[in-house]
Amino acid sequence: MELRHLRYFVAVAEELNFSRAAERLHVTQPALSRQIRDLEDDLGSPLFLREKGRISLTPTGLRFLDDAREILAKSDRAVKCVRHRESLITLRVAYLPSAGASDLPAVIRAFRQSHPGTDVALSELPPASQFADLQAGRIDLALPGNVYAPLPPGMTNRVVATHRLAVAVPAGDPRSRRRKLRLLDLRDADFLSLDESSYPGRGAMLETLCQQAGFPPRIVQRADSLTALLTHVGAGAGLALVPDHLGILPRCGFRLVPLVEPEVTIPSHAVWKTTATSPGLEAFVDALAADRS
């Protein structure tokens, strides 16, 4: 039994006339009659009563009609789903964990509605891996947060948001109860930073800010991910300077305190290849900038 047998059967069952069904299916009547006979032989039961030039469904035929329609509908849906997926253009985006908990999901949802022919595939990666994948052509767009170190050659970037620096302070530290902190207030603190190999330029930024405030930072540990950094802060290992939008993330054992003197504003970038031709890329970056402005 093949799907065409079911289509032939449904057409005859709905028309109750072999001639009209054959015309509807664009086949000859003898060929259609033969296919129905083959189907009945396969099932081992008649589907139609044939008498005096008229046909009608047998009780078996009535029950089989519902099943045949359901099978054909599922088959059509499966074909449409495959064709839809094949026709989609995929925009491959790498992002930091903090972006996934912010307004990125809302931007993607709105983008998919306005660009139904473009899908967005996400990868959660640190900046260094984002740049490597961008150069290798494995992704189309990188969202590395702030770009502290020089971009690799052939890259273009655009600021899509700005954030202020805050201090992540362990909950048991008296400074966690402060409404705001000066950088100079932290001159005796143990600092945590991000590993330079994964987050290029982050440690250098911390050292520059502290030196400008008049002291060298005492960096006691470097984390290879943002999640690990905040976990270490929550465990009481030290303080960290982080963008204030991380306040929307679940905070276990630490508090974000606004940093003043200096009040530091950091940009968040979107980065892509200068030669990129990915459909939808420019529109997606525009949507990011519009939503976060």
Image (tube, grey):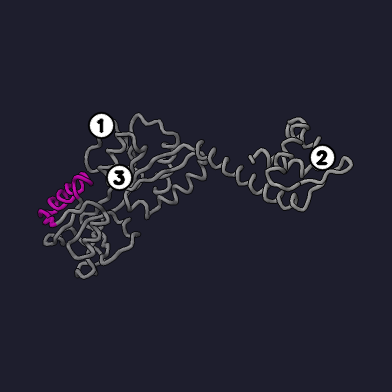
Relative horizontal placement of residue 84, taking residue 178 as reference (left or right):
right
Decide which of 231, 110 is in the foreground and name it.
231
Residue occupied by mark 3: 144
In this figure, which residue is indicated by the disc labeled 2?
17
Q: Which of disc 1 and disc 3 is earlier in sequence?
A: 3
Q: Say if mark 2 contacts mark 3, CB within 8 Å.
A: no
- Left or right: residue 120 versus residue 5 is left
State which region is magenta.
195-220
Please rate how many residues cluster around mark 2, counting C-alpha atoms within 10 Å: few if below 14, some from 14 to 19, many from 20: some
Where residue 107 appears, x then y in whole percent? 44, 48
Q: Position of residue 168 (x, y in %)?
A: 24, 61
Above/below status of 58 relative to 189: above
Q: Name which residue lies at 54% across and 38% down.
A: 83
Residue 73: x and y in percent read 64, 46
Q: CA distance from mark 2 to mark 3?
A: 66 Å
Element carrying mark 2: loop
Q: Secondary structure at mark 3?
A: strand
**Res. 229 image quadrant:** bottom left
Q: Amino acid at mark 3?
A: Pro
The mark found on residue 153 in the picture is 1
